[in-house]
Image: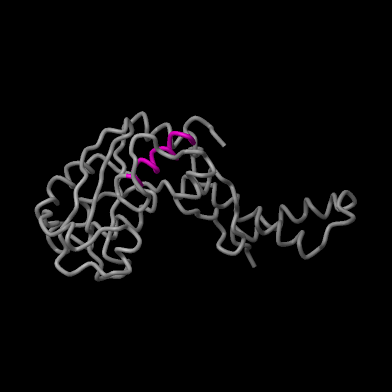
Amino acid sequence: MELNKREAFFAAIFNGFLSHKDQFNDANPDEAIRECWAMADRIIYHSNRVESPREIANRWINKNIVIVDTETTGLDKEAEIIEISIIDCTGAILLNTLIKPSKNIPAEATEIHGITNEMVEDAPSWKEMLPQVLELISHGWVAYNAKFDARMLEQASGSRVDTDYFGAPECAMQLYAEYNGEWDKKRRKYKWKKLTDAATSLDAWPEEIDENPHRALYDCYLTLGVIRSIAGGKK
């Protein structure tokens, strides 16, 4: 039977371990096997990655790519955007606005980001802001949890816009996970960390704005700080 790629990498790594097992007399056999599988998984993970995290971060900065963050009424398929901020890699604010949702903001969401129904009462609707958002992200964009923010943009827009207009955002959370290098053997990828944990690890707290985390603009600057730190090789 032909081995798949993962099994083939494992076999090569494990054979190498066996040929030098005299150097690992105290090694636990089960742990050695698990580590060989983890090494095979890391090889596969990196097999189609041509840039290092530092190279990616520098590419974003050199391109002056925009950074997006949203605050929402929740996390489910009915959640709506109630705040969006977009900055570039120089720190310039391109968009920072509250959004009035079609439904009331749940109290549990307000507890997280502090945005109340009264605050969004006179805010523009998502429909009004959508053309500006699409223009700003048209040349590519980054978000800390890009998959979530992309889903929220698409979800808020509904059938008004073809999803292709939102492009394929790049993820700063994945960037930090790879830079941090903590491998998750169970999930076969690097462990994702919260934005605040990444900023603390890199001492990347923003000086540009005096505001609490969990507001969109602050988290944009927090993401920018993480990107800048990785670009400079800071650990």
The image position of residue 180, as x and y in percent, is: 56, 45
The image position of residue 26, as x and y in percent, is: 88, 56
Q: Quadrant of residue 71?
A: bottom left
How is the rendered protein coloured? Answer: one colour
The image position of residue 125, as x and y in percent, is: 11, 57
Q: Residue at image x 16%, y 63%?
A: 101
Q: Which residues are magenta?
A: 218-230
Q: Quadrant of the C terminus?
A: top right
Label tally: 0
Q: Residue at image x 33%, y 33%?
A: 89
The image position of residue 209, as x and y in percent, is: 33, 38
- What's the magenta bit mostly, secondary-structure-wise? helix
- Closer to the camera, 234 or 14? 234
* Residue 190 falls left or right of residue 30: left
Q: Quadrant of residue 184?
A: bottom right
Q: Quadrant of the N terminus?
A: bottom right
* Residue 19 falls left or right of residue 150: right
Q: Residue at image x 58%, y 47%?
A: 181
Q: Is residue 57 above or below residue 32?
A: above
Is residue 114 magenta-colored? no
Q: Is residue 100 above or below residue 225?
A: below
Is residue 225 magenta-colored? yes
- Closer to the camera, 34 or 72? 72
- Closer to the camera, 149 or 7? 149
Q: Residue at image x 62%, y 60%?
A: 185
